[in-house]
Image (spheres, grey):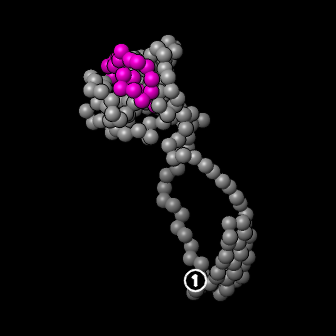
């Protein structure tokens, strides 16, 4: 089952104090319990509740999350582009994201290359190492990088690095993500 998106207005927060026909009341809570009372036409009441929770994250999402979005982005592509994506996966290519400027050129310090568009293949003579100008890059954590356009790419051949920053010598632009 995919993610559930809830829409609507957030609940209105009730005041701690009020009076008139509905009575008045006060309340207290510390994250683990709470109580309150009221008087007037509505009478007296007491309540109790509990709960706890924790969480962590780095603000960019995870490899697993971003990989899961690829098929959703590709769903809007023409059939031929979706077939290229499937063929790239079957060939063992690493599927990832690459971000470019508005004009399809590198935004994170790369060399001048052919502007990105579906079907464009970028190649480099190397050497193959991340953070080197002879290497083509991609990522599975796209918010971490600069660029106004997001592309889904296939990295063919040997790939170095990790989900934050992959490097290769042949990168195929499969389609635009956003």
Q: Position of residue 139 (x, y in %)?
A: 46, 31
Q: Is residue 156 left or right of residue 15?
A: left
Residue 39 visible at all = yes
Q: Is residue 120 magenta?
A: yes
Towards the viewer: 112 or 15: 112
Q: Position of residue 103 (x, y in %)?
A: 25, 33
Query: Circle 1 sits in a helix, a strand or a loop, which is it?
Result: loop
Q: Quadrant of residue 107?
A: top left
Q: Quadrant of residue 99?
A: top left
Q: Position of residue 27 (x, y in %)?
A: 66, 77
Towards the viewer: 3 or 103: 103
Q: Is residue 83 left or right of residue 147?
A: right
Q: Which residue is mark 1?
A: 18
> In the figure, 155 relative to 148: above or below?
above
> In the figure, 81 relative to 177: above or below?
above
The residue located at (65%, 87%) in the rendering is 40
The magenta span reads 118-139
Towards the viewer: 21 or 147: 147
Magenta stretch, overall SS: loop
Q: Quadrant of residue 22?
A: bottom right
The residue located at (30%, 35%) in the rendering is 101
Q: Is residue 61 left or right of residue 107?
A: right
């Amino acid at each position: 089952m995919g993610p559930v998106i809830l829409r609507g207005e957030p609940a209105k927060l009730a005041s701690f104090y009020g009076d008139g026909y509905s009575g008045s009341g006060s309340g207290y809570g510390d994250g683990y319990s709470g109580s309150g009372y009221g008087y007037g036409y509505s009478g007296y009441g007491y309540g109790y509740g509990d709960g706890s929770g924790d969480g962590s994250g780095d603000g960019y999402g995870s490899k697993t999350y971003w990989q899961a979005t690829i098929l959703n982005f590709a769903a809007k592509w023409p059939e031929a582009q979706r077939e290229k994506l499937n063929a790239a996966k079957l060939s063992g290519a690493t599927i990832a994201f690459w971000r470019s400027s508005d004009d399809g050129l590198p935004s994170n310090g790369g060399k001048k290359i052919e502007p990105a568009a579906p079907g464009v293949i970028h190649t480099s003579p190397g050497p193959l190492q991340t953070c080197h100008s002879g290497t083509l890059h991609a990522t599975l954590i796209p918010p971490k990088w600069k660029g106004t356009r997001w592309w889904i790419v296939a990295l063919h051949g040997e790939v170095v690095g990790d989900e934050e920053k992959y490097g290769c010598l042949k990168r195929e632009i499969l389609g635009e993500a956003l």
